[in-house]
Amino acid sequence: AQGYETILTETRGRVALITLNRPQALNALCAQLMTELNDALARFDADPAIGCIVLTGSEKAFAAGADIKELQPTTYPQSYTGDLITPWDGVANRRKPIIAAVAGFALGGGCEVAMMCDFIIAADTAKFGQPEIRLGVMPGAGGTQRLTRLVGKSKAMEMCLTGRMMDAAEAERAGLVSRVVPAAELIAEAMKAAETIASMSLPIVMMTKESVNRSYETTLAEGIRFERRVFQAMFATADQKEGMSAFVDKRKPAFRNG
Ligand code: CO8
């Protein structure tokens, strides 16, 4: 719709679906794709009609990593001054929830982008890995940090040092993904979760995301203090009154995002 060449976007009700679409390169994340992805995410994040975003790839690959053909000739000064990685932060810095729906390969930067999303629903065909070491580099878009926090040091270290891939079942056991679904149901399941989220109060959803993410950035005591202040602030919303009144009245709440 916005003249994108490497992604597809659509909206279904209050859910936005973004599909990575470079089939000839297993959705390798070239600079153009990351620019377009950031643009689409920023638009949906700013659109009051959207309550949740789903990010997916193809059946074969969520994304097979950064575009190795683009990176191969890059020199250190270019990598430093060109600031190649900063645009990737856009995925992690969005304020509305983003669900990664992963089928097939999520490797290198593909695994890193999936981990930047708020949670991952995996098809039973999903394969996760940080194979950068085989290319003579290491993960550069958060993989050494986010994977370690998600699956623990031992598994993260093994994956980063050997490049071994995890299948969906292992990824679920390790806590990398929230759940595994049959590949044919991946998009429907991710959309269902996104519709559920989008039916909640948007400000409460955004405050909840911010509070969970806070746990990564601070001590337990400070995180709990942050949670408490945000929780208390929720009583200033009409949606708190509506949600609790609806429970008491035994009816469905009608949130007004206020
Ligand atoms: N970059 C560029 N092209 C790719 C990539 C990639 N990451 N992955 C696949 N392709 C291309 C292939 O070159 C091939 O193109 P062509 O047909 O023109 O030769 C096409 O996609 C299909 O791929 P294959 O023929 O290899 O498909 P297979 O089914 O045989 O294999 C694999 C699938 C195992 C996924 C294989 O393609 C593979 O190993 N890909 C590379 C995986 C990888 O190493 N990823 C890490 C990349 S580095 C990285 O992500 C660092 C991120 C750092 C932060 C960001 C910095 C800007």
Image (spheres, rainbow, N blue to C red):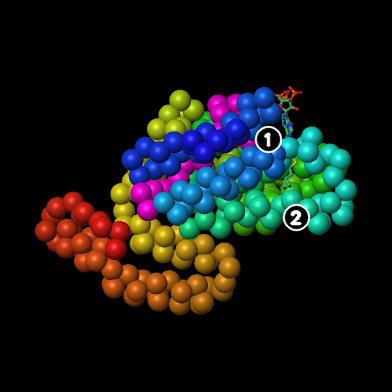
Q: On residue 84, which mark appears?
A: none
Q: Quadrant of ligand 1?
A: top right
* Residue of label 1: 28
Please rate how many residues cluster around mark 1, counting C-alpha atoms within 10 Å: few if below 14, some from 14 to 19, many from 20: many
Count of numbered labels shown in the rendering: 2
In the image, is 233 to the left or to the right of 108? Answer: left
Taking the magenta stretch, the answer to whether it contains residue 89 is no
Q: Name which quarter of the figure residue 164 lies in.
A: top right
Establish if 174 lies above or below 22.
below
* Residue of label 2: 83
In the image, is 36 to the left or to the right of 236? Answer: right
Q: Give the image location of residue 138, x and y in percent.
A: 78, 48
Label 2 secondary element: loop
Query: What type is the residue that disc 1 sits on?
Result: Ala
Q: Residue at x 60, y 26 (%)?
A: 60
Query: What type is the residue that disc 2 sits on?
Result: Asp
Depth check, mark 1 against mark 2: the one in front is 2
Q: Are marks 1 and 2 in contact (CB under 8 Å)?
A: no
Residues drawn in magenta: 48-64
